[in-house]
Amino acid sequence: MYIGIIGHFGGKESFNDGQTVKTMNIYNGLLNSGISTIDKIDTYYIKRNPIKFLFIFIKSFFRDKKYIVLLSINGRRLLFPILFLLSKCGKDIYHYAIGGRLANEVEKYPSWKRYVSSFKGNWMESHELEEKLQSLGVENAIYLPNFKKLNVLEEKDLDKDYIPPFQFCIFSRVMKEKGVSDAINAVNKINSKYGKQIVTLDIYGPVEDDYKEELFSLIESSQKNCKYCGIIDSSKSVEALKSYFALLFPTHWKHEGIPGTIIDAFSAGIPVIARKWQYCTEMISNGKNGYYYDFDKPELLIDVMEYAIVHANETMEMKRNCLKKAVEYSENHVMKQIKREMEI
């Protein structure tokens, strides 16, 4: 039996955004669990080569019985009506939602309730999103966490103590909307307050073109408090992050889903300091595996970072809890649930 995966594989290019990474994680997860009969229906080609996309899609119709679908908002607008028709033709559609806005979209577009209700399942990264969809009458919404194939650090390899300066990091797409400028400014203000370099910031990830000038200007003026460290393959994130004091996640997007960068941090045994986005508390337990602060008060990032370094022993004790939480987002754990749901 062939399974079709409809999602953004990126053609022959390399992408590090959450949608592409999640699509590749599903594909590789199925391969790693022994399923090799998989068709890639790459939404990358919808705009760049629509004829190629149409050919691949039609070919899959005659071969695939089951589909896993991972779509952005634009992909949902375009393909949901087609997937609805496929479901009526006897295809099993499993929609693995990208981001955290599906419930809002179902409310906004009444026809979408009929579309998603026709699928075999709608897999939600968040319990809250699952419950919201069910309250809207989408009874086939179930919780299925985001995941990554990572070698979770062993407890014996955790750092036992930490010597200043306290090293913070960001590991995501590098853009203003991810709060990168906020983090750089916070580091500068803390060091200015103490009159010495007590905290530093290393930034990893692909830089958005329209943010490059601002980013490197801020870094240059930070007096070596902050530096850009390039792109690290997500499979090597644990090794890259394990020695940091904490990861910063000061996002400007309140409707983030379950960010992969936090899975990376927990797998490396480092706590997270996050702006409290909508689903934050499903990942971060305040004072246990990280800290969060009011989304509407972004200036509190400085206060929370200061608290973390003043209470460094408490922060270091969180590392074991991070490793325990990481297991919930492991490939093995989630793939068992996927195979059970799909009866494969």
Image (tube, rainbow, N blue to C red):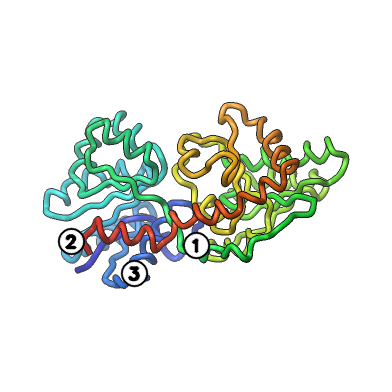
Task: Count neighbours of disc 3 (C-alpha within 10 A) and say few if under 14, some if 14 to 19, many if 20 or more.
Answer: few
Looking at numbered disc 2 in the image, what kind of residue is underneath it? Lys
Instruction: Nearest to the eye among marks 3 and 1: give it.
Output: 3
Q: Are marks 3 and 2 in contact (CB under 8 Å)?
A: no
- Tell me how far mark 3 sits from mark 1, CA to CA: 24 Å
The image quadrant that residue 3 belongs to is bottom left
**Residue at mark 2:** 65
Locate residue 50, reporting x and y percent.
32, 55
Looking at numbered disc 1 in the image, what kind of residue is underneath it? Ser
**Residue at mark 1:** 14
Compared with residue 254, is residue 224 higher up or lower down, i.e. above or below?
Answer: below
107 to the left or right of 227? left
Q: Residue furthest left?
A: 89
265 to the left or right of 282? right
The answer to whether residue 249 shows anywhere in this view is no
Q: Residue furthest top?
A: 296
**Residue at mark 3:** 33
Sequence-wise, the earlier of marks 3 and 1 is 1
The residue depicted at 83 percent of the width and 46 percent of the height is 197
- Tell me how far mark 3 sits from mark 2, CA to CA: 19 Å
Secondary structure beneath dot 2 equals: strand
Q: Are marks 1 and 2 in contact (CB under 8 Å)?
A: no
Secondary structure beneath dot 1 equals: loop
Secondary structure beneath dot 3 equals: loop
- Tell me how far mark 1 sits from mark 2, CA to CA: 29 Å
Quadrant (top left, top right, bottom left, bottom right) of the N terminus: bottom left
Locate residue 170, reporting x and y percent.
63, 50
